[in-house]
Amino acid sequence: MLSLALVPILMGSGLAMQTAVNSKLRQAVGSPYLASAVSFSVGALFLLGITGMTGGSLGISWQVISQNPWWIWSGGVLGVIGLTVNLLLFPRLGSLQTAVLPIFGQIVMGLIIDQFGLFSSPQTALTWLRGGGLVLVTGGMLVATGLLEKRSVTTATRGKWLWQGLGIGAGMLMATQTAINGHLGVVLGSSLHAALISFSVGAVLLILVVIGGRLSLSGFRTTDATSRHNWWQWLGGFLGALYVYGSSWLVPQIGTGQVVVLALFGQLLFSALIDQFGWFEAVINRVALSRLVGLVALFLGVLSVHFL
């Protein structure tokens, strides 16, 4: 059981790594949409390979399409928006804020979805204990991101607040995507099949954006020239798909709550390390002790929300 508990921690670390890796790819190819298209395509191909090796179904019957609401196919679209926003946030806010702000948005939207049973999710009322956990999450987020620090209001800080708000909004979309893909997995009888559809929809949408926007592919030539040194910049889609596949494999064995919380621990820890040491050629943003305290508070709040 201990060895299984280490797997979601590594998966969460992979999510933090994915953001840094995709951000580097975005710098190389010159477009967040092009970088997202590569990431989603790699992820879709990986999941397609896993589906083929496990003998999973690839088809969708017309009955499934006609008898279910349109929104069950929108998870890939929301994933595209969330990933692209992360690519835009990373160079502006750093690894830690790019992880913390969407996590806060996911927690808030997750509670809303649970409260009202949105997207055919099981309805779970907001108790006082879960509400207290939300307060702790909010306080931890404010401290960890430095939003409580006194600073003069300038055009730059106003612009930063806008990006921070966008990060929270992206997290809310990610929580919505999770609920939608969860329902799609129930409809199809396979969470892996649902993940493949989500990644495939995202990849097709982004390829159409690249073609329709006539985005230059010249960045690939530069990327090819440096790929021997930065080969890891192509792994973002693989890391994202590995998280999705790992979750579908682990949840039946150790439970959804365990997977979510342990993966979150790995994501927060590795995001802080990326900021602290500038791994994956990221800008170094030293993590102060006060922000570590905020991260601990955020993590404890998440524990309260998921287990109380």
Image: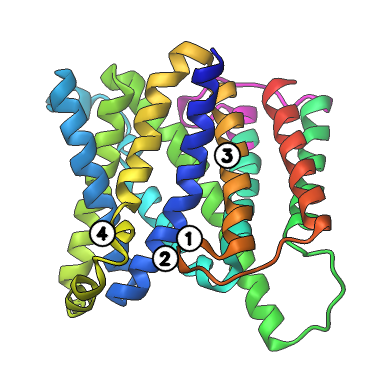
The mark nearer the N terminus, 4 or 2, is 2
Q: Between disc 4 and disc 3, whose residue precedes?
A: 4
Circle 4 sits on which residue?
37
Q: Residue at x 78, y 61 (%)?
A: 288
| Lower sequence index among marks 1 and 3 | 1
Q: Secondary structure at mark 4?
A: helix
Q: Which mark identifies residue 229?
A: none
Pointer 4 local density, CA inside 10 Å: few below 14, some 14–19, many at least 20: many
Circle 2 Cα neighbour tier, 10 Å, few/some/many (<14 / 14–19 / ≥20):
many
Q: Residue 73: x and y, percent?
A: 29, 39
* Label 1: few (<14), some (14–19) or many (≥20) C-alpha neighbours in 10 Å: many
Q: What residue is drawn where x is 38% and y is 34%? A: 244
Nearer the observer, 29 or 280: 280
Q: Amino acid at mark 2?
A: Ser
Q: Which mark is residue 23?
A: 2
Q: From the viewer's side, name the closer residue of 146 and 11.
A: 11
Q: Give the CA separation, mark 2 to mark 1.
A: 8 Å
Q: In this picture, which residue range is highlighted in magenta?
A: 112-128
Q: How many marks?
A: 4
Image marks 2 and 1: residues in contact by CB distance under 8 Å: yes
Can residue 113 be found in the magenta stretch?
A: yes
User: Which mark is first along the chain, 2 or 3?
Assistant: 2
Secondary element type, mark 3: helix
Q: Earlier in the sequence, mark 2 or mark 1?
A: 2
Residue 86: mark: 1
